[in-house]
Image (tube, grey):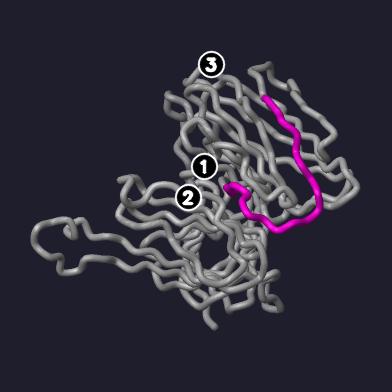
Amino acid sequence: MAARRAALLKGAAAGGAVLVTALAIAAAAVGTTLAATGSSGCSASAQIDSQWGSGSSGGEIVTVTVANTVTTTGTKWTVGWTFDSGQRVVSAWNAGVSASGATATAVNAPYNGKLAPGASTTFGMQLAGTGTLSGFSCVNDAVGSSPTGMVSSTPVSGADVTVTQADSNKTITLLVGQTLGVSLNSTFHQPTASGSGLVQLSASGGTPTGQQMMALYRAETTGSVDLSSVGENPCVHDPTPCPSPSILWTLHVSIVTSLPTGGQTVTVGTADNLSTVSLHVGDTLVVSLNATYDPPKLSVNGVLTSGTVTGGYPTTQPLNAQYVATAAGQVDVSTATDAPCFHQPTPCPSPAIPWKVHVTVSS
């Protein structure tokens, strides 16, 4: 799902030179735009669109604009910053956003990373808590290194596709530019990769830290990659031998520049809630809902591959999410309505309205 995505850029291939200048968002009134423009090839500005409450009980909507100011085309960008005490990301759109403690990063979505000379793009965030965002830095595909100190530990919240232990031995398809989050329990080692096309952006936790193992990757070029990890059964440290001292986890990743097309396009909307949709590999599924809905989530990976996702809460624009059927199987596509009051201490006057369709894909 490409409206909300997360990342750091590390070891990227050389490309068009675009370096975003430092940016700081200070606590300010609604509508205030704070910008930093330099000679390093790009300008960035942030605007507080709306704000409510104060401190940790408040929140705000922020839009960040990134513009290419040089004569060459850039293909990727990654922005990092530090939260004020008590602030956190509730949701994000048009970029993948992840956070570890007070440090956060945003990486372009698959559809807005490429910026021609003079072009610009935006991404937005809903934040819990008000305050000052500071320490902004950015890196692009030409620079090829991560902003200092940024280590993402929450790929689940922002990656285009997230896999868990339940996805072992599965095959997933990524488009070039999409991100992959791996979330395994604390007994697993960080994954190793064999093949080409996938670049690790961040990693945290896993044995022996005692923390949940998280890793984030970006599909850089077409190719095929196998990710593998080993989980140590806690009984391996007991005096008596383990019946199964280790747990093997593998994932096959196929990276392509375009998804198979030529099939039918099926569009579903509010009236299709709880219905069943039948597709063939190569068909396109379009989810069209009003602006109050969050971008949809997939119950399993590998059956549908996310294309473009635009609009939805809190953009005030209609939600349009496109998926291509890439493998035979079954998957639920689900979402729910959202509102600012759902993120407040006091209950909303009306609960969220869930929406779901069951999709069956045949070859």
User: Which type of secondary structure does the marked residue at label 1 adopt?
Assistant: loop
> Which circle's residue, 1 or 3, is located before the other in the chain?
3
Three-letter amino acid code at disc 1?
A: Val
Mark 2 = which residue? Answer: 203
Q: Is residue 326 visible?
A: yes
* Depicted 60 relative to depicted 76: above or below: above
* Whole-number angstrom distance, CA of label 1 to CA of label 3: 28 Å
| Residue 110: quadrant of the picture | bottom right
Which dot marks residue 151?
Answer: 1
Q: Nearer the viewer, mark 2 or mark 3?
A: 2
Three-letter amino acid code at disc 2?
A: Ala
- Is there CB contact under 8 Å for labels 1 and 3? no
User: How far across and down, in percent of the image, does residue 83 sit?
Assistant: 55, 27
Q: Nearer the viewer, mark 1 or mark 3?
A: 1
> Which circle's residue, 2 or 3, is located before the other in the chain?
3
Which dot marks residue 281?
Answer: none
Q: What is the magenta range?
A: 4-24
- Is there CB contact under 8 Å for labels 1 and 2? yes
Mark 3 = which residue? Answer: 54
* Depicted 188 relative to depicted 106: above or below: below
What is the crowding at mark 2: few (fewer than 14 residues within 10 Å), some, or many (at least 20)?
A: many
* Whole-number angstrom distance, CA of label 2 to CA of label 3: 33 Å
Three-letter amino acid code at disc 3?
A: Ser
